[in-house]
Image (cartoon, grey):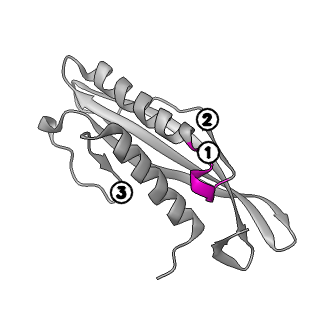
């Protein structure tokens, strides 16, 4: 099976973040319920994928991902902050993801705590990953 460039990018991000925050679990949807005993958990979700430009047979694209660190308890803020710092460092050390992307930049993230249980803390971080594909083949880097 041949994977799209987008899926290869998501898997590269998942691999880097997982290695950076270990032993903290990193979950990509479809998710399973997060245990209260799990401590801190990092969720990786996709916020969107857009086409930025067409140039002959090449398409410039932007993939937006969200990392959300979730924890409970007295040390929740320290735990989620540390997880996001480690994840950010791992992503920015190789912003071209070994040739898969044109670059990564951090973008604004909204903090929405309405869906959380009492005593929970969730801190998000969002990133935009620019990449290029062939117009006729999403599996080929353009």
Q: In which quarter of the image is residue 128?
A: top right
Residue at 15%, 36% (x, y): give it.
36
- Residue 19, image x and y in percent? 35, 45
Magenta segment: does it hold 67?
A: no
| Magenta stretch bounds | 94-101
On residue 128, which mark appears?
Answer: 1
**Residue 43 percent across, percent down from the top left:** 36, 45
Q: Which of marks 1 and 2 is nearer the N terminus?
A: 2
Relative image position of residue 38 (x, y in whole percent): 16, 38
Residue at numbered disc 2? 107
Q: Do the residues labelled 1 and 2 touch (CB within 8 Å)?
A: yes
Residue occupying image coordinates x 44% and y 33%:
124
Quadrant housing residue 70: top left
Give the residue drawn at x 46%, y 83%: 1
Say above or below: 113 vs 44. above
Label 3 vs label 1, nearer the camera: 1
Report the side of 43 relative to 137 (left or right). left
> Which of marks 1 and 3 precedes in the sequence?
3
User: Seen in the image, is 34 located left or right of residue 107?
Assistant: left
Identify the mark nearer the N-term, 3 or 2: 3
Residue drawn 35% across the image and 57% down it: 29
Q: Residue furthest right?
A: 56
Secondary structure at numbered mark 3: loop
Left or right, 103 with reference to 52: left
């Amino acid at each position: 099976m041949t994977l799209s460039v987008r899926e290869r990018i998501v898997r590269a991000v998942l691999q880097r973040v997982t290695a950076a925050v270990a032993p903290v679990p990193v979950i990509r949807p479809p998710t399973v319920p997060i245990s209260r005993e799990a401590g801190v958990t990092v969720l990786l979700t996709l916020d969107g994928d857009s086409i930025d430009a067409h140039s002959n047979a090449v398409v410039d694209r932007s993939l937006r991902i969200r990392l959300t660190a979730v924890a409970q308890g007295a040390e929740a803020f320290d735990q989620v902050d540390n997880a996001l710092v480690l994840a950010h460092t791992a992503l920015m050390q190789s912003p071209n993801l070994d040739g898969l992307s044109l670059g990564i930049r951090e973008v604004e993230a909204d903090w929405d705590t309405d869906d959380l249980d009492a005593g929970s803390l969730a801190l998000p971080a969002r990133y935009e990953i620019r990449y290029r594909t062939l117009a006729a083949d999403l599996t080929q880097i353009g």
